Amino acid sequence: DAGITQSPRYKITETGRQVTLMCHQTWSHSYMFWYRQDLGHGLRLIYYSAAADITDKGEVPDGYVVSRSKTENFPLTLESATRSQTSVYFCASSAATVGYTFGSGTRLTVV
Amino acid sequence: DAKTTQPTSMDCAEGRAANLPCNHSTISGNEYVYWYRQIHSQGPQYIIHGLKNNETNEMASLIITEDRKSSTLILPHATLRDTAVYYCIVRPNAGNMLTFGGGTRLMVKP
């Protein structure tokens, strides 16, 4: 099915563990983004990618790692999860001149 | 990046038009105005965007003032399902990053 999918939808992990959130889009959009949204707050940009093998930091990149070996995938890894990284994570994709399309989000809880 | 200012919250009666204002007095050049909305717990949804002229699609209308320093999103016949947080964003000329502010929480009431 065409679209942008995130997995898993829900994840509970322990402090200090590594966890990877997946994002896959089927449109071959050049741009992909990761945002986090804390309860009751707006979205903050973590990392973005303008094309395969090109990534750059957003507003809140510390503690996160991204890669983009293929245009359609943009995984986000928390190297050593902390409680402050408990949040809802949204992935988005975009062609250069149109709006973003967001995934349904991954709700991550770090205990 | 151009900053936007929106009211924190608004109410609207079901069936009436919802007019959501946005101030972007520092907008420059060819920067576009984008509107998104986020219904509870879902990913943000694109609504409409524009540069200078008024725009309309199946979801909404966007009215941009002649000096481009403000705009209004119009939902012509609001329904309960339009209850959401609405974000007005100015997309910078360089790059393709959108910075989300606090938005306007629209409550549509029966």
Image (spheres, coloured by chain):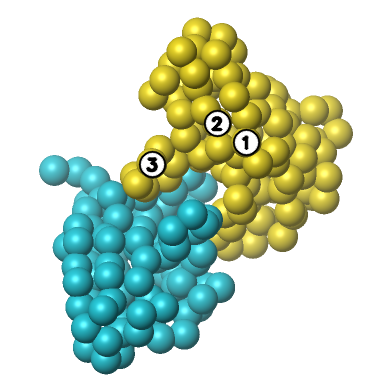
Chain colours: A cyan, B yellow
Q: Quadrant of residue B38?
A: top left
Q: Are marks 3 and 2 in contact (CB under 8 Å)?
A: no
Crowding around mark 2 (Cα neighbors within 10 Å: few <14, some 14 to 19, many 20+) is many
Name which residue type carries label 3. His
The residue that label 2 is drawn on is B106
Viewer can see residue B8: yes
Distance from disc 3 to disc 2, alpha carbons, whole Å, reads: 11 Å
Name which residue type carries label 1. Ser
Does A8 appear above or below B90?
A: below
Distance from disc 1 to disc 2, alpha carbons, whole Å, reads: 6 Å
The earlier-in-sequence mark between 1 and 3 is 1
Return the residue nearer the eye: A12 or A68. Answer: A12
The residue tagged with tag 3: helix, strand or loop? loop
**Left or right: where does residue B59 sit relative to residue B32?**
left
The residue tagged with tag 1: helix, strand or loop? strand
The residue that label 3 is drawn on is B40
Q: Which mark is residue B9?
A: 1
Name which residue type carries label 2. Leu
